[in-house]
Amino acid sequence: VSLPAILNFAINPLIGAIDLFWVGRMSNALSLAGQSAANQVFTSAFWIISFLPSVTTPLVAKHWAAGEKEKARDV
């Protein structure tokens, strides 16, 4: 059940490393600095967006399985 979430969080650093590799091949320090800054923005947005489903899904599932459908809707 948690394998998709683990893969989701494991792929993010890989994306940054691949981008860094290809931009680094351009031999331009300014491009590399710009890519690094963009990678920080992407990573921050990724963690903020990924945080909500990762936390709320188990809470909703717990209440739903216990038959507390109203509490599940409130989460």
Image: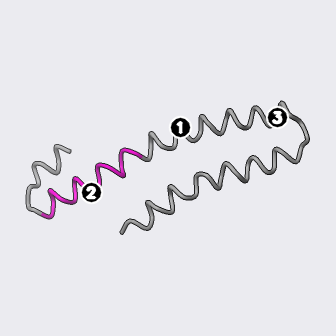
Residue at 50%, 55% in the rendered image: 9
Residue at 57%, 41% in the rendered image: 43
Which corner quadrant of the image does residue 4 belong to? bottom left
What is the crowding at mark 1: few (fewer than 14 residues within 10 Å), some, or many (at least 20)? few
Residue at 64%, 56% in the rendered image: 14
Q: Position of residue 66 (x, y in %)?
A: 10, 62
- Specify the amino acid type for callout 3: Ser
Question: How many numbered circles are shown?
Answer: 3
Horizontal side of 51 relative to 12 (left or right) equals left
CB under 8 Å between callouts 2 and 1?
A: no
Closer-to-camera residue (67/1): 1
How far apart in space, not on screen, are marks 2 and 1 (Cα)?
A: 23 Å
Question: Is residue 63 shown in magenta?
Answer: yes
Quarter of the figure that contains the C terminus: top left
Q: Who comes first in sequence, dot 2 or dot 3? A: 3
Helix, strand or loop: magenta stretch: helix
Q: Which mark is residue 44?
A: 1
The magenta stretch is 51-65
What is the crowding at mark 3: few (fewer than 14 residues within 10 Å), some, or many (at least 20)? some
Quarter of the figure that contains the N terminus: bottom left
Question: Is residue 29 shown in magenta?
Answer: no
Q: Position of residue 36 (x, y in %)?
A: 71, 37
Label 3 sits on residue: 31
